[in-house]
Amino acid sequence: SVLSACEELTESERIVISLAICSIYILDARSQFIEKAEASRMVSRPSLRHLWWEGCLAYIVWDCIPIIERRELYSLAIEALHVLLYGCVAIGDNQSLGMGDRNPLAPLLLSRRARGKALDRLVIDQTHLNRRRISQMEVDTAPSKTGETKSSKKQQLQLKKKASIEAASEVSSFSERVLHQVVRSSMIAFSSIRGLARRLKRPLPNVLRNVFCLEAQELGLRLENDSKTELEKARESENKGYSDWTPITDKAIANALDNEKEGAGSRCIFVGNDSSPSINVEQLAMECYEEGSLPASDMVSGDSAVVGGWVGWHDEGGYVRAIFRVLSSAPLLGVDWGCSSSLAPGDETLFCSPYQGAPFDLHVGFGLNTEIDDSSAIAHSAIPGFYVRQRQKIERFLNQLTETNPQGLCDAIFRAIEARLIFGLDNNRKDPSLERDLKNLRTLSFIAAGLGGQLLASVFRCMVFDYRHYR
């Protein structure tokens, strides 16, 4: 019925949407009839999610959702999102946002990052569906031209306003209920929590006032600016509007050149110092720091502040990830360049190949599973991921890193790369990243020394908490 209702679908879109519909109901049936013992075994090894057919089917549905939304099939998109989030399909003409009973299989279908995006898409799709219903309601209640009166127009506007208020209230109520559920268990990333809280149009500390945010407590994330006075906080809590912690940023004004490409994918280009209109916004920022126009004079404090002459890299955090890999591989990740580390019983699946760069469970974000037993009692258990399995090693490694001076960081990077080089020569084994690390040895050491052990420890804690999200 969905395919027949939309006549503008291309043949490729029909195939993709048909595949999505079949996958949705297969996952729904699987969630309903899976045995409890089998579900428990799967929950105990979330690192193997991508090797199970249920996980592969879930990501097929996830990749089909943008195509479904592009064709404005919002009811189908809501069904798809509901089965990914709660393990069951939301069916019915009066389809509305609901929490649903979370099936034991549901936490395995998506990662923390994707689950947060799915909740956001669920709210957006329901908003579009509500607007369409309001528009259809206007058509259904529109009086004939001969009998049209001012009172009927007024009644129509009142119905529209009432429906809009109810739809907005439904979205706000759903966002609040979801936040109270996922914030304590850290089932979605903190960035997704902020996105849902923004829909409530209240300051983030106000939204999370009586809720324990697990991720913020573990990682030391701030909810508001520390410089605010108590009076400013009180005024902000009274005012309607979202606000949270904002970092200190440098600002520069530049005029972008007209780009021949049009659309959302086109990038802005600027004129650089060599009068060549080929630099992007990141290159423009690096030029500003090099020539001294950034940081602004009012942001520079102290006589020792250096203005101009700065050299930067735009690599989307690639060097920091390389430092994490170099420093943590042997002492933390268990990669001894031979994968012969002793593993506890049941952990053999964490290293399935000697060429792995990290254990499989590094990509499992930390969170709590909510379980309801036969007596309706609610219990929380930690998701068996890397952050839980290696908690003592993580704390010991990060404490040692915090106390390491800049010279010690440089020496640690040198020794780690040297050990890999010796192992590769002795065993005649190729290491694809070794040549790149050797080439960037001085750069990696320089960045590590500049950041310092305390800052690196804070960044690395985020990575081991949920590497898939914070990398």
Image (spheres, rainbow, N blue to C red):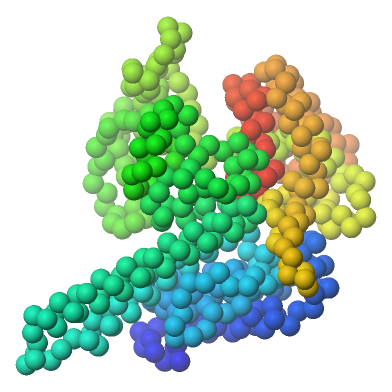
Depicted 130 relative to depicted 460: above or below: below
Q: Say whether residue 310 is left or right of residue 47.
A: left
Q: Is residue 124 visible?
A: no
Residue 377: x %, y % from top left: 74, 65
- Looking at the image, which residue sits at the far top? 303
Q: Say whether residue 369 is left or right of residue 297.
A: right
Instruction: Determine the residue positioned at 78% across, 73% down.
Output: 374
Q: Is residue 80 visible?
A: yes
Instruction: Determine the residue positioned at 63% across, 64% down.
Output: 110
- Specify the quadrant of the image occupied by residue 179: bottom right
Depicted 286 relative to depicted 267: above or below: above
The quarter of the image holding the C terminus is top right
Depicted 114 relative to depicted 417: above or below: below
Residue 281: x %, y % from top left: 37, 38
Q: How many marks?
A: 0
Residue 216: x %, y % from top left: 59, 42
Depicted 120 relative to depicted 395: above or below: below
Instruction: Determine the residue positioned at 8% across, 80% down.
Output: 150
Residue 350: x %, y % from top left: 82, 54
